[in-house]
Amino acid sequence: MEQPMDYASSGVDLDLEGSAVASLIGALGRSVRAPGQPGAPVDVPGGFGGLVEFGDHLLALATDGVGSKLQLASHLNAWGGVGVDCMAMNVNDLLCVGAEPLAFVDYIAVPKPDPEVHAAIGASLTEACRLARVTLAGGETASLPGIVNEVDLSGTALGFLKRGEAITGEHLQQGDVLIGLPASGLHSNGYSLVRRILEHANADLNATCPFDVSVEGRGVLRFATAPEAMPTLGEVVLNPTRIYVDPVIDLLQHLTATGEHGGRASVRAIGHITGGGLSNLLRLHPSLGWTIDAPLPVLPEFTWLQEVGGVATDEMYRTFNMGMGLVLAVAAEHAQAIRSWLDARLSGTAIVGAVHDEGHHVTHVPSGVRFSHY
Amino acid sequence: MEQPMDYASSGVDLDLEGSAVASLIGALGRSVRAPGQPGAPVDVPGGFGGLVEFGDHLLALATDGVGSKLQLASHLNAWGGVGVDCMAMNVNDLLCVGAEPLAFVDYIAVPKPDPEVHAAIGASLTEACRLARVTLAGGETASLPGIVNEVDLSGTALGFLKRGEAITGEHLQQGDVLIGLPASGLHSNGYSLVRRILEHANADLNATCPFDVSVEGRGVLRFATAPEAMPTLGEVVLNPTRIYVDPVIDLLQHLTATGEHGGRASVRAIGHITGGGLSNLLRLHPSLGWTIDAPLPVLPEFTWLQEVGGVATDEMYRTFNMGMGLVLAVAAEHAQAIRSWLDARLSGTAIVGAVHDEGHHVTHVPSGVRFSHY
């Protein structure tokens, strides 16, 4: 019998990964930095960004890599978006705790350095720094021919916020409204499955994309075609991850500065939809549930991947963002005003659902998919 | 003709690496963060840690990995020191700009997660956090079977210092005295060459070390032998990198708080002796030179590696720390007092030389080795 087309059978054993991470975390000790000292840890649910004390401020660190999307970039020798992917995976995590990104460092491990590849990654990191409004404060290129076969790219972002302004989800309540921010594409998760589907379909990444990719407000970064031509399939699957610093940081600053729409306290929780898809929302609160009854449009690449791969719908929503890269949970009475403010900055932003006190589930109403664990 | 036993022919092309890094840096743009804003870049010679503005403080980031030392750890399934190596490579860089480490995040890329390996790395990171006095603020484990063959471990350290207290080397002057801090062993550099020598010598890493490793004040982390037995060769070559937070941060705090020994301004420059060996000192000043006429004792593993590998002396000093992991350049009139203060915390600390204004060289007097470029 053929193996099912799902994430677990595409080469990533999530249970094993979970148990490895649990082993690592179980082996960790308490911090030597006591509460009140600079560097003392600050617990925030969700674990998107790690926070430490720093006087009147909190500092936040997030570290992540681009993952197996890099294998497609390497296959196509198309590195123009990977710096943006790397930045996005990190700074979008910082946004979830309300931290404004400040600086970034990259780590590149290669079997053998290649000046052309490094120049392309450098240019992509520069664009990423512009989009995330951060300083590239350093980086490391390691030549590790015995350890890596191909380029691995990861990074760490540093952010900050005022003490007392962390977005923790602790004030989340039934009736809070969910605002979805549109994704630019696949972002940087689920690529083991994407690659397996592409192989299964014998898809030509250099051919014109076999489906209509045009979505209002979403551009596709071109490395093989002219902007007015139809993009290739490779361009679509490599489209860089959206960086949500603009509009989210601007929204938070506006709410804080003006007190409008209930001020910053109106934003109760922010979830970055990464590996795990919608189940990521369960990280933000221990008991409340999330109902998505009016989701953002599914991006055409997800529809196509599901069709040609024969992937189950719940597997799609547990693996991919499906068109929504970030979710804000906001106070109901200010939701329309906040949505309008955001939509003026990022077209396609919409109210997608609400928070309910009927069990710790995420329910995607149109598809009937429900997740009860992350 | 057999290839020479040097770093360049052991699988790492330093010229290619340099040109790849130059390509990346050449592609980078200016920061969007203007001077005076949080996150604005601050230039400091040496490039050990990247600094950004943060109100009355500067924040520093350093990112680095353990490199090919991991291949030996993997071969021996001995992960107890690699977290310390990873931490040391980063926090020792922060010390060079005078930044006190606060927090750390790790990035582990594996072909397949292994709970036992992760638990051992977690325990090593916990010990590293204790030694470096930092909070482990997060981490990422990536399963990348198509990209990595073996465990890759890197990390990023965050540090801080008061504005105006950065150690920049700008006040370095002829006559400043060099204080050397002893290394714990090979630290985390030069392992491509180490591995090549070990193969060439057909050395048995599980056998008792073929030379006398006892050095006053230097312990060897045991994973194969009891503390009272002779260590194995594997234990000696994997001995974790020394973390210099204690005594260097304590020294800087003491000088700042008391004003003794000329205060913090007496410490003019700090160099971390990593890949590049003594030539690292050239990064700290554009024109002054460094004369080492009374070096710390060469650790026995370096002597043995040189002998069995037939490695040229200048290659040894350009690749390894040779027994001195950190160098402080201090004001001459306070050098003895500062050395004594440090030696009480880290036995084996000694005055090793002085700064000279006779060209941009590092001269190691006993061996006659001289470096004019990093």
Image (spheres, coloured by chain):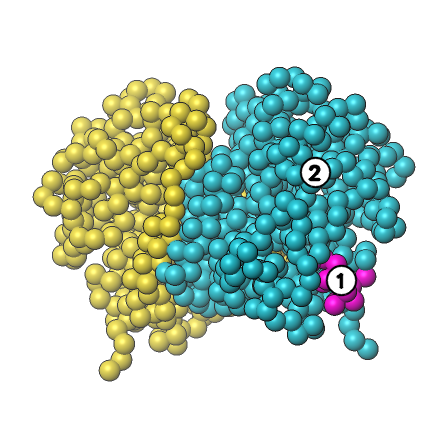
Chain colours: A cyan, B yellow
**To which quarter of the image does residue B99 belong?**
top left
**To which quarter of the image does residue A247 belong?**
top right
Which of discs 2 and 1 lies nearer the camera? The answer is 2
Q: Which mark is residue A306?
A: 1
- The amino acid sitting under disc 1 is Gln
Residue A145 falls left or right of residue A227 = left
Q: Where residue B140 appears, x then y in whole percent?
A: 59, 50
Label 2 to label 1: alpha-carbon separation = 24 Å
Residue pictured at 26% horizontal, 57% vertical: B318
Residue B255: in magenta span: no
Element type where label 2 sits in the image: loop
Q: Which mark is residue A349?
A: 2
- The amino acid sitting under disc 2 is Thr
Residue B106 falls left or right of residue B37 = right
| Residue at the limit of the structure toward the right, as seen here | A358
Over which residues does the magenta segment extend? A301-312
Check the image and report above or below for A307 versus B331: below
Element type where label 1 sits in the image: helix
Q: Where residue B356 appears, x then y in whole percent?
A: 13, 41
Residue B169 falls left or right of residue B201 = left
